Amino acid sequence: MTHGSADLSALLPADLPQRRLLRTPVPGPRSRALADRRSAAVAAGVASTLPVYVERAGGGVLVDVDGNSFIDLASGIAVTSVGNASPAVAAAVAAQATAFTHTCFMVAPYEGYVAVCEALGRLTPGDHAKRTVLVNSGAEAVENAVKIARRATGRDAVVVLDHAYHGRTNLTMAMTAKAMPYKTGFGPFAGEVYRVPASYPLREPAPLTGAEAAARATSVIEKQVGADRVACVVVEPVLGEGGFIVPAPGFLPALARWCAENGVLLVADEVQTGFARTGAMFACEHDGVVPDLVAMAKGIAGGLPLGAVTGRAELMDAVHAGGLGGTFGGNPLACAAALATIELYEQADLAAAARRIEERVVTRLRAVAVRAPQVAEVRGRGAMLAIELVRPGSLEPDAAEAARVARACAERGVLVLTCGTYGNVVRLLPPLVIPDALLDEGLDVLEEALLVGAPQAAPV
Ligand code: PLZ
């Protein structure tokens, strides 16, 4: 092992070459045929980033039905952090599938559910006594965190941040900031949800410390809602879909202090930031913040659907028996996958891998940014990294440029995603086990996409 890198190759499927390879134009003929079948069968409201159909995936590559092998800098939106088709996860799921696939934990319980709850109690921030409930998705985790917060405090109001994303169910749509595509035409939305300003350092009219940005938010709560009506403040420690926005230092601690002083619960939505993604097991750790409740999903189970809420025992247990649950919540296959996945995060120290990825990517992209006038900022934490694109010489968001860069990468065999309230952010979420050479090749392609065909600065 050399300094700054670690050999994680044992965690990759042995029979799948970790390489970029284009055999056909993107999309190839088989993918185009599937696209035709799709348009006659799949609801038009479900959109896909990549126009190809996947046949296999493993480690840091996706292989399509035409034999093209893409470098995966998306991880299925921060899910396959331990690598796609991780051998340890696949084996755990296969073993569980032959033992039993489902009983419903509310009908006939099993050890896997309990073991996942034990692990999450140990891994989430804070040494206090904790309890956990398992669900199926990120949105369901956030919904349950709000239910628990309301029941435990006896209060109704829920405070969320500008640029927040919390899901697509009715309550979580209300909590999500962006109308198109998430909310437009889907109302009316759940009530008692209040939005306050976030900390968005690039776009503040004047520089604001984290404490000042928190005071701006809490003053809106006090004036427009009333602190004593608020059950919880729900925050993404790094705003995800909103643009990978890292708040100014001190923002989250000041918000946490205000919550504690006012009997308001702090709920961390760690659905995207959790599980080693940002270089710590949970992103709140970077700010030394201990949330009352943590909502989790995505990276928890190596690609199987699982969500969770972990929180202070007295809050979680304020809910009456039978008040939490669901048919599939904590499905045995998902629990087996989660236990294998969590073991990988810990044993292979994938948080350290995320920090190495950050160093590698940020160094590289900051150098590119000097030559790419449309890059306003390179930011993020760990392996949750982004570049915000603007019209050169201004801060005017350039969504078309983000779409162009993502498309150019896809055509050259690299999958990157966009995000942001203004749609102008290109984000990178590589699997934490991605080989260095593959990551570097992906960055070569991204660099070329940024430098060739970009809009030029307007002449002065
Ligand atoms: N909270 C912070 O990032 C999911 C959304 C993809 P689910 N983000 C990806 C899309 O367009 O639907 C997310 C998140 C945060 C909650 C969620 C919701 O998680 O598992 O998609 O319900």
Image (spheres, rainbow, N blue to C red):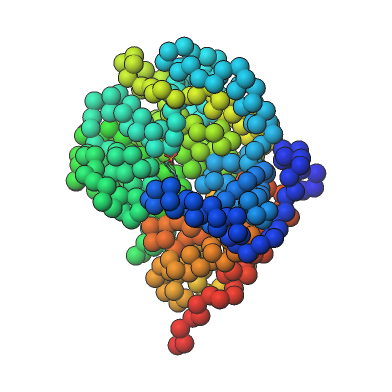
- How far across and how far down the image is residue 230, in percent? 25, 35
Q: Nearer the viewer, residue 361 or 403?
A: 403
Q: Residue at x 43, y 37 (%)?
A: 138
Task: Kindly identify the residue that appears in the image at 39 percent across and 70 percent down.
Answer: 396
Q: Which residue is drawn at the image coordinates 24% and 39% (left, top)?
A: 190
Would residue 361 be seen by someone viewing this image from the given angle? no
Taking the image as shown, residue 29 lies to the left or right of residue 139, namely right
Q: Quadrant of residue 171?
A: top left
Residue at figure coordinates x 44%, y 21% from the top left: 131
Q: Report whether 300 appears left or right of 209.
A: right
The quarter in which the N terminus is drawn is top right
Locate residue 234: give its quadrant.
top left
Judged left or right of residue 383, residue 131 is left
Query: Taking 129 as reference, is 433 above or below it?
Result: below
Image coordinates of residue 92 in percent, x first then y, are 64, 26
- Where is residue 238 drawn, in percent x and y? 46, 47
Q: Nearer the viewer, residue 382 or 336?
A: 336
